[in-house]
Image (cartoon, rainbow, N blue to C red):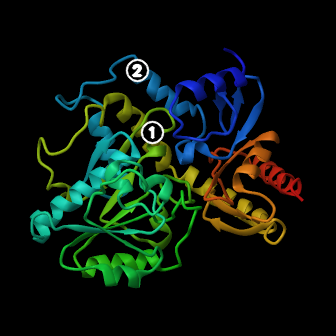
């Protein structure tokens, strides 16, 4: 099996069809470019849904992983290991929080945030046992575990997986008043994506996060920011919340925290919140393992300089200025912040899938969502020349449907 068609044939027969990938089989990658098994190169404009913010094969991250691979990869949390202190302190400093709790995947981090918020609600706020509720947003995407899909409004993610976990109230995204009306004595947290990525890179109204922060403080409710996709440089700041100077009670992090090398996730909060977790109440065999910590520390060190944040902001201005020119010419709307864009294709021309396939034929990898929307989120290491070339291919792809 050496060609794309041969490999895809086996994959389609022997693996569950829980994804609908574009028909490309990637073999190697460097920076913002990938190469398939047939030798064709593509510009990666998805970055593993922001897992590869710092590029494929980032030298600092790969070197950290290689050093650690040769020394120690796993102890479980039954013992301490020498990489854990640096990772916890570094991520705590980056987020401005006292403590972190590491896990592996983003969904695990969200599940952790839910558990911590409920425990805080019972032990600190005084909510009666088993009555805690968490307010979440329409069109959210926080993962696909059974608890998380219980409060999804996406039929593909939710339907057929009941019975559903209770304890969540769904309100309109971007409306502080909707949150205010939903809060009651049993509310322990508001879980929000500062920018909704899977929904199509939806940016809330200006001031939304600030008002949400003020409301949560006034009502003694935890504000939990899911920055798994939006955080760690993607939007031109370390966190998307930084655009409004907002500090949530809890950050939920993942994807880019592992540098595209290993799964690394975590929540970060102060001791008055995370201190409610005691030994035996939560954990993971691989959570906070030595390899993950070494990689995570390398990512944190990269972010300390601010170089990637500044680059994402500068290239984001270039990207959005160019995309804005397409509105009314095959593009209905463009949204986003930093090096992240959701582009609504005129549905009378083509679907998002069709445009993504046309882009692939032109050497650009992107992905559709919700019918007519495509997302662009290239690695932050992309050159301005390559970025503009990708938009040129989008223009050409759209024109091909006229």
In the rendered view of the protein, which quadrant contains the C terminus? bottom right
The percent position of residue 371, horizontal first and vertical second, equals 65, 58
Secondary element at image label 1: helix
Residue 89: numbered disc: none
How packed is label 1: few (under 14 Cα within 10 Å), some, or many (20 or more)? many
Of the image marks 2 and 1, the number of the one nearer the N terminus: 2
Q: Is residue 228 visible?
A: no
- The answer to which quarter of the image holds residue 348 is bottom right
Q: Residue at x 40, y 16 (%)?
A: 70
Instruction: Report if residue 65 is visible in the image.
Output: yes
Q: Tell me, yes or no, whether the two marked residues, 2 and 1, touch with CB atoms within 8 Å.
A: no
Q: Secondary structure at mark 2?
A: helix
Vertical comparison of 150 with 59: above or below: below
Q: Please give the name of the residue rendered at 69% of the width and 60% of the height, measured from the top-left corner.
A: 372
Q: CA distance from mark 2 to mark 1?
A: 15 Å
Whether 215 is drawn above or below 199: the answer is: below
Which quarter of the rendered picture does the N terminus lie within? top right
Q: Looking at the picture, does residue 165 appear above or below residue 180?
A: above
Q: Which residue is mark 2?
A: 69
**Horizontal and vertical percent position of residue 110:** 34, 53
At a point 73% along the width and 57% down the height, the residue shown is 351
* Left or right, residue 189 beside residue 253: left
Name the one closer to the observer, 180 or 292: 180
The residue at which mark 1 appears reads as: 258
Question: Residue furthest toward the top?
Answer: 1
Find residue 401 and report its image quarter: bottom right
**Left or right: 131 as drawn, with respect to 145:** left
Using the rendered view, name the quadrant where residue 56 is placed: top right
């Amino acid at each position: 099996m050496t060609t794309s068609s041969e490999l895809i044939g086996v994959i389609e027969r022997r693996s569950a069809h829980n994804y609908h990938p574009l028909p490309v089989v990637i073999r190697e990658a460097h920076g913002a470019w990938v190469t398939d098994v047939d030798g064709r190169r593509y510009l990666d404009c998805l970055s593993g849904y922001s897992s590869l913010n710092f590029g494929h094969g980032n030298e600092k991250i790969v070197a950290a992983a290689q050093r650690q691979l040769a020394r120690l990869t796993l102890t479980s949390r039954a013992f301490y290991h020498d990489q854990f202190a640096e990772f916890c302190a570094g991520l705590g400093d980056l987020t401005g929080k006292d403590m972190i709790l590491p896990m592996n995947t983003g969904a695990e981090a969200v599940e952790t945030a839910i558990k911590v918020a409920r425990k805080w609600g019972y032990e600190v706020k005084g909510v009666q046992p088993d009555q805690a509720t968490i307010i979440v947003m329409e069109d959210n995407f926080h993962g696909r575990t059974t608890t998380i899909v219980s409060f999804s409004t996406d039929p593909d993610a939710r339907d057929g997986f009941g019975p559903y976990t209770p304890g969540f109230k769904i309100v309109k995204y971007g409306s502080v008043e909707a949150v205010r009306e939903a809060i009651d004595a049993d509310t322990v947290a508001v879980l929000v994506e500062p920018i909704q990525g899977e929904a199509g890179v939806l940016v809330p109204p200006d001031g939304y996060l600030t008002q949400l922060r003020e409301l949560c403080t006034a009502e003694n409710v935890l504000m939990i920011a899911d920055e798994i996709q939006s955080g760690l440089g993607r939007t031109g700041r370390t966190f998307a919340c930084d655009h409004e100077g907002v500090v949530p009670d809890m950050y939920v992090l993942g994807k880019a925290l592992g540098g595209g090398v290993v799964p690394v996730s975590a929540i970060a909060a102060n001791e008055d919140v995370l201190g409610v977790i005691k030994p035996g109440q939560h954990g993971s065999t691989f959570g906070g393992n030595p390899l993950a910590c070494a990689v995570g520390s390398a990512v944190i060190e990269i972010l300390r300089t601010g170089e990637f944040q500044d680059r994402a902001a500068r290239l984001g201005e270039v990207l959005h200025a160019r995309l804005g020119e397409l509105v009314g010419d095959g593009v209905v709307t463009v949204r986003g912040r930093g090096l992240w864009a959701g582009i609504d294709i005129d549905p009378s021309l083509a679907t998002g899938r069709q445009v993504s396939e046309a882009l692939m034929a032109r050497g650009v990898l992107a992905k559709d969502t919700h019918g007519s929307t495509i997302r662009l989120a290239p690695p932050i290491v992309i050159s301005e020349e390559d970025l503009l070339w990708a938009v040129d291919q989008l223009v050409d792809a759209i024109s091909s449907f006229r």
